[in-house]
């Protein structure tokens, strides 16, 4: 019997062979009368490849052909939510619920859609519906806990959500990791490290916990313990890129740069575009004097500083930035930073700004097209991990806004989902920027954790309103904390080759 091509496509997608799955689903979804499953699978494969806008076309086609399918409206809402089009996602799910949808997965999509639409009360209510139906779904519980934390800054209330999931039978490892991140976000890193150490002792077969506990031990200067835990993770998952990455971090803290570089190179042999491995390989190469560092951290060639032109409809850049600041301020509804992001003492928007219907925000993405293309042309082609991916075209993978309060900063970090990353300055703390310490400046090249020898930033860039900075996503970047009574409002986005 001839196997069903959709069954084969589903198996390929499950195995991560998305290009092969796409080749099977495309002709089936492009027929004049495609079946529901063909449309749904084709959309899922496209989303797996990051092609959400194209996937949306097939989800829309599915609800036009099968308007009484609750699953079709669920899929459409999920894609709209992924694109940051919250109000449309809510409307699609309302149609689905009217047709009988009532499962935890659909309520989770509704929670994210309401969040993207700015309805924070509605988002919490939807997450409550998820918890009533499937509190053991840890992903939704972690999202809910983070929402509670960002809205109210109440660590106990956020942790209570995670505890509910644990008591309902949710897998402990992701919940413990999320709880430790909340503790760190609340200014209790030692408490979080203690939790992870205990978790690693009681769940010694969980590599993610072992690595997190190793990192916690490293940050408390317990380097022998950090190495023991990282090696225990390697014994379980010897060829895991994340495990090799964690070992590189530990070896750098111990002053063993040669071993760190060897582990990072081993990880890159498996995952050659992994931004974290690229960042740590560069750090180890910098310490031992390996030429790899110059290939990955060519600041003059890889970092670009641009000033955008006023978009059509605005006579001056100052006028546009004033309108943009007003539009962005309306989106900053949280009192605290996310638990799992780099910023501290500020807030971050929680959906893709590319999905905004606000013409002021949409104008921003038109304004950055010219500098983005200029930067890709300036980078050029080459064999290194940055230039090797340069197609001359791009797709925005994520876009968000950050508003820092006095004392705010970004911890040094990289962007896991990008190829090129950015910082665009809307409002800047001018008094702070003029200080000798370069408060509020963007810094590049300083690793986020201790190394021996200790490494400092190699490049500082002064923010100014209307300035766009572009750099490789694997490049360490952070913000020098500022103490003046001012705010700092930015947009950041990642792009990937198209």
Image (cartoon, helix red, strand yellow):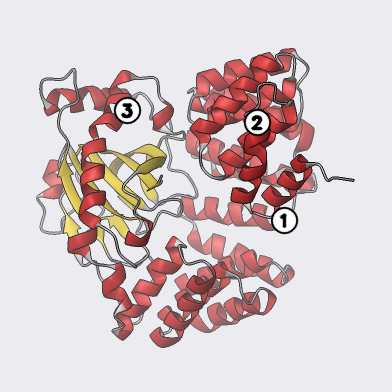
3 or 2: tag closer to the N-terminus: 2
Report which quarter residue 471 is drawn in.
bottom left
Residue at the location (57% across, 22% down)? 89
Residue 93 - label:
none
- Name the residue that disc number 2 marks: 29
Quadrant holding the C terminus: top left
3 or 1: tag closer to the N-terminus: 1
Measuring from the top left, give residue 166's x and y in whole percent: 74, 49
| Residue 290 appears in the figure | yes
1 or 2: tag closer to the N-terminus: 2
Residue at the location (26% across, 53% down)? 481
Measuring from the top left, give residue 327's x and y in whole percent: 31, 23
Q: Is residue 231 above or below residue 15?
A: below
Q: Is residue 200 above or below residue 143?
A: below
Q: Is residue 442 above or below residue 96?
A: below
Report which quarter residue 97 is drawn in.
top right
- Name the residue that disc number 1 marks: 172
Measuring from the top left, give residue 317's x and y in whole percent: 13, 28
- Name the residue that disc number 3 marks: 328
Measuring from the top left, give residue 330's x and y in whole percent: 35, 23
Most foreground residue, 122 or 263? 263
C-alpha distance separating marks 3 and 1: 37 Å
At mark 1, the secondary structure is helix
């Amino acid at each position: 019997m001839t196997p069903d091509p959709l069954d084969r496509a589903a198996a390929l997608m499950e195995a991560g062979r998305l290009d092969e799955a796409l080749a099977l689903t495309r002709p089936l979804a492009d027929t004049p009368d495609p079946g529901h499953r063909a449309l749904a699978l084709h959309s899922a494969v496209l989303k797996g490849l990051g092609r959400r806008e194209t996937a949306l076309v097939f989800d829309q086609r599915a609800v036009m052909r099968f308007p009484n399918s609750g699953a079709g409206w669920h899929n459409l809402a999920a894609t709209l939510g992924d694109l940051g089009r919250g109000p449309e996602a809510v409307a699609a799910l309302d149609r689905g619920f009217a047709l009988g949808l009532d499962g935890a997965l659909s309520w989770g999509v509704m929670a994210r859609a309401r969040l993207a639409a700015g309805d924070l009360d509605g988002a919490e209510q939807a997450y409550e519906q998820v918890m009533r139906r499937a509190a053991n779904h840890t992903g939704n519980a972690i999202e809910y806990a983070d929402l509670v934390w960002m809205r109210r800054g109440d660590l106990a209330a956020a942790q209570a959500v995670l505890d509910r999931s644990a008591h309902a039978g949710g897998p402990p490892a992701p919940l413990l990791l999320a709880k430790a991140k909340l503790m760190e976000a609340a200014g209790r890193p030692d408490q979080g490290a203690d939790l992870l150490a205990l978790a690693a002792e009681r769940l010694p077969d969980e590599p993610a916990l072992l690595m997190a506990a190793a990192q916690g031990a490293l940050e408390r200067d317990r380097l022998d313990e950090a190495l023991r835990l990282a090696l225990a993770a390697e014994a379980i998952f010897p060829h895991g890129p994340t495990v090799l990455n964690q070992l590189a971090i530990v070896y750098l803290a111990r002053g063993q740069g040669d071993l760190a570089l060897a582990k990072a190179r081993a990880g890159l042999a498996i995952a050659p575009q992994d931004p974290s491995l690229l960042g740590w390989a560069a750090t180890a190469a910098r310490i031992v004097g390996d030429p790899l560092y110059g290939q990955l951290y060519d600041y003059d060639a890889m970092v670009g500083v641009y000033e955008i032109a006023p978009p059509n409809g605005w006579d001056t850049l100052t006028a546009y930035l004033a309108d943009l600041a007003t539009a962005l301020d309306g989106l900053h509804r949280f009192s605290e930073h996310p638990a799992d992001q780099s910023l501290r003492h500020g807030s971050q928007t929680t959906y893709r700004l590319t999905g905004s219907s606000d013409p002021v925000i949409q104008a921003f993405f038109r304004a950055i097209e010219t500098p983005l293309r200029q930067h890709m042309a300036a980078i050029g082609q080459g064999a290194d991990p940055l230039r090797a991916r340069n197609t001359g075209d791009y797709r925005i993978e994520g876009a968000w806004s950050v508003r820092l309060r006095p004392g705010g900063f970004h911890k040094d970090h990289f962007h896991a989902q990008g190829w090129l990353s950015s910082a665009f300055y809307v409002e800047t703390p001018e008094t702070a920027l003029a200080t000798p310490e370069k408060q509020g400046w963007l810094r590049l090249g300083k690793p986020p954790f201790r190394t021996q020898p200790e490494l400092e930033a190699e490049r500082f860039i002064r923010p100014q309103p209307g300035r766009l900075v572009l750099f490789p996503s694997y490049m360490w970047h952070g913000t020098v904390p500022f103490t003046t009574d001012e705010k700092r409002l930015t947009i950041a986005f990642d792009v990937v080759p198209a």
